[in-house]
Amino acid sequence: MNNVKSNILDEINSLKNQFNKEFDKIINISDLNQIRVNYLGRKGFVSSYFRRLGEFSVEKRPLIGNELNELKKYIEEKLKEVNKRLIQIEKTEKRYDITLPGFKRFIGKKHPLTMIMEEIKSIFSFMGFEIAEGPEIETDYYNFEALNIPPGHPARELQDTFYLTNNMLLRTHTSPVQIRIMEKTKPPIRIIAPGRVFRRDTPDATHSPIFMQVEGLYVDKNVTFAELKGIILTFARAMFGKDMKIRFRSSFFPFTEPSAEYDFLCMFCKGKGCKICKGAGWVEISGAGMVDPEVFKFVNIDPEIYSGYAFGMGVERIAMFKYQIDDIRTFYENDMRFLNQF
Ligand code: DAH
């Protein structure tokens, strides 16, 4: 009798070992379901032992039954645990579909005005101009007076500005850098001065209270107006292509004599007149001229020995022309739909 009892208990024990081995090989839910059917199903191993209970005496049945119940519980528990883990894995795999394209990280890019500014600087550097800088907060002296615009001069009204004190203001143009450089440098001087300028203008499609200019200045012996035209034309062709043409119209600035305003040929209609140039065939860029001898006196350069030319340049205008933008405000609104196009 003892034998029979130990035999059945041994069998139950080796069934448990067999289960453990198969359990270790489970890699997915379908393996798991198969093992569940084999062991716990109606016709599975465990059930078949339960059915055999009747072969044993009434005294032994509780012991064997107990063993079987323990084994059943053991198997159920282990399967439940691995089931949970497998479901988790399958969910994760569904969440990470490795066939989907990756996320692109936005690393930013240069503002269109920065790009144009860099291009302008590089063209003039190539022609031998050094890059100079001046402060955005200027004194009345540098912004106006030393440029031959005394208090009360009507030219001040064209450049109404933001005053910080009676004497300090936000510069209305980059021309004061001319004075600052000529004060401390002996000719020959060949610089451009890029930077931000400010005017009390109401914003509209062509006006912004903050905008950018590039000033140019060349002072040496025997500098002529022809050289000024040459440098502007060379710049215009480098920026817009070899078919570019320029034109000078006579004008007035207190710090140049003679003075001119200069235009670039409209590259979109080649001078015929279109929407971009508003029918003119030309696009206005800025002013230029020969440095006025009065200005040389402020900086102790002898106008009998030296002459020079100076020019301004509106950076937004060049960018608007190059990219066919018809509203200056778009540069300052930080609208990604606009900025992403460059
Ligand atoms: N400073 C002038 C302006 O902002 C532009 C200008 C005109 C600059 C003539 C110059 C110049 O250097 O020679 O309207």
Image: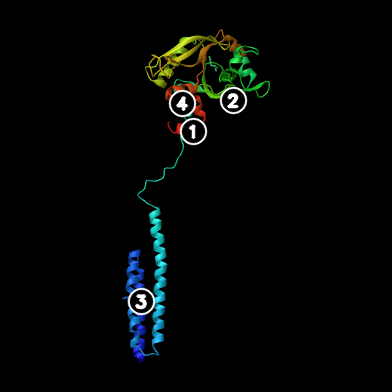
Residue 17 numbered tag: 3
Q: Are marks 4 and 1 in contact (CB under 8 Å)?
A: no
- Residue under numbered circle 2: 136
Amino acid tagged 2: Glu
Helix, strand or loop under label 2: loop
Residue 27 seen by the camera = no
Q: Which residue is mark 4?
A: 116
Check the picture and name the quadrant holding the N terminus.
Answer: bottom left
Say which of marks 1 and 3 sits in front. 1
Q: Position of residue 342 (x, y in %)?
A: 43, 31
Numbered circle sitting on residue 335 = 1
Q: Residue at x 36, y 77 (%)?
A: 16
Q: Secondary structure at mark 4?
A: helix
Using the numbered discs, state the Cα–Cα distance from disc 4 to disc 2 in whole angstroms.
20 Å
Residue 29, picture quadrant: bottom left
Mark closer to the chain start, 2 or 1: 2
Cα separation between marks 2 and 1: 26 Å
Residue 174's x, y, as percent? 56, 20
